[in-house]
Image: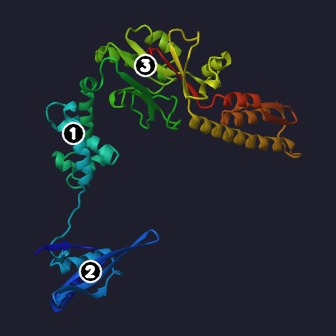
Amino acid sequence: MWITLWITPSINPLTIRLLSGIIQVMARRTGTVHVATIKSSYRDRVYETHLLRRTFREDGKVKHQTVGNISHLPPHVIEIIRGSLQGQIYVPLSEFFEIVRNRAHGHVAAVLGTLRKIGLEPLLATRPSRERDLAVAMVVSRILNPCSKLATCRSLEEETKSSTLGEVLGLGSMDEDDLYGAMDWLVARQGRIEGKLAKRHLGEGCLVLYDVTSTYYTGSECSLARFGHSRDGKKGFPQIVFGLLCNGEGCPVAVEVFEGNTADPKTLGSQIRKVRQRFGLRRVVLVGDRGMITDARIREELAPVEGLDWITALRGPAIRLLARQGAIQLSLFDERDLAEITSPEYPGERLIACRNPFLAQERARKREELLLATEKDLGKIVVATQRKRGGLKGKARIGLRVGAVINRHKVAKHFQVEITDEGFSYQRRTERIAAEASLDGIYVIRTSLPA
């Protein structure tokens, strides 16, 4: 006989005992009783009916008698009745166990198991060590619950831990300084770790993806923190810039941190040396965006290196120039979305013009929204200049207000404005807008690779 320990917030222990007892008595008095579940369909909906039925033999035939309908009961109560009739005994869990502490384990097992399956621990260090275990704990914690090092330490400590992570890794007692010490240990091993990753994920002739981003810094002790172009909207804070090298599938291989005011193209040289010298690859294809792999970088750092090819894209002004020269014709995209073109401006290179209709729709929508928002703000300035009392007057004052508006939405090139001492007027430059709209969704890939 099975004894099921069962707990639910909706039924108290006394009710469980009474319910089990009543069912057992009823079963003894009426013979074999069971719960029959009947399903029926009506208008694409499935209905379930739960009936208490007694099974018996009469004249050598098995017959069923419905004792009662229990369909109105909650599903878990119906399962208790079903189990009780099958001989199970339900006992309240609180009578035998006291829940002193609850530590989650499932998500720890999933992430830590995946980490070990991909072999991350041997990449950090071949031999097991406390520093390696602490580094692994920080990686897993960063995935499960990103927080500060102090909060991470509290989630791993014996007295305050919220999961089994610290226990599974055998970390024991620690404080936040131990975590910072493990980070110092990790930085000292960065070169060896990246070398192992390069051997595993890079090879001759492979694609190497590279891009940079930044993050703001609120402290005062970072020697690399500088004010620069903020990508996360924190313009009042210094920042650091870091670049990430990945293989063709986007798997990270190496990372490098730069001063916060470093321009994207200025980080490219160290990545070339890293790939060629540290990783020992003689032939690779470097992939970067149009702001990274510029004409100057191609001329000074990429073209002189034998075996180093690249893939990037052209900026908007260069695309418009090709269109004016006739190299890009809209008829190219009547039947296909890709077309290879040539231009004397890019000797020895291949240009692949692409058209994305969804991107074209999005750019048209965004441009119209910016134009309407600008016109709304400019209309307010027109009204201000027409007020008889306290109106906005003076060419300089009006010009300041107008400049602030058209520069806010970055569409100044699409408006023609006339400012006088007494007033202000504006209108759209429809020809310019139409010319820009004709190239919506078109971008041009630029590469040194042969076909």
Amino acid tagged 1: Lys
Amino acid tagged 3: Leu
Residue at image mark 1: 117
Image side of residue 371 versus residue 178, left or right: right
Label 1 secondary element? helix
Task: For residue 37, say whether it is visible.
Answer: yes
Q: Nearer the viewer, mark 1 or mark 3?
A: 1
Tell me how far mark 3 sits from mark 2, CA to CA.
68 Å
Decide which of 444, 264 is in the foreground and name it: 444
Q: Residue 128 sits in which quadrant?
A: top left
Q: Nearer the viewer, mark 2 or mark 1?
A: 1
Residue at image mark 2: 12
Q: Position of residue 189 (x, y in %)?
A: 24, 27
Sooner in the amino-acid sequence: mark 1 or mark 3: 1
In this rendering, the answer to whether 8 lies above or below 171 is: below
Q: Quadrant of the N terminus?
A: bottom left
Residue at image mark 3: 268
Q: Residues within 10 Å of mark 2 (few under 14, many from 20)?
A: few
Please say which color scheme the image uses: rainbow
Contact flag, marks 1 and 3 (Cβ < 8 Å): no
Amino acid tagged 2: Asn
Label 2 secondary element? loop
User: Which residue is rendered at x = 32% and y = 83% of the image?
Assistant: 70
Decide which of 160, 87 is in the foreground and name it: 87
In this rendering, the answer to whether 228 lies above or below 205 is: below
Tell me how far mark 1 sits from mark 3, CA to CA.
33 Å
User: Which residue is rendered at x = 27% and y = 29% of the image?
Assistant: 187
Image side of residue 89 versus residue 180, left or right: left
User: Which residue is rendered at x = 33% and y = 80% of the image?
Assistant: 73
Q: Residues within 10 Å of mark 1 (few under 14, many from 20)?
A: few
Tell me how far mark 2 sits from mark 1, CA to CA.
45 Å
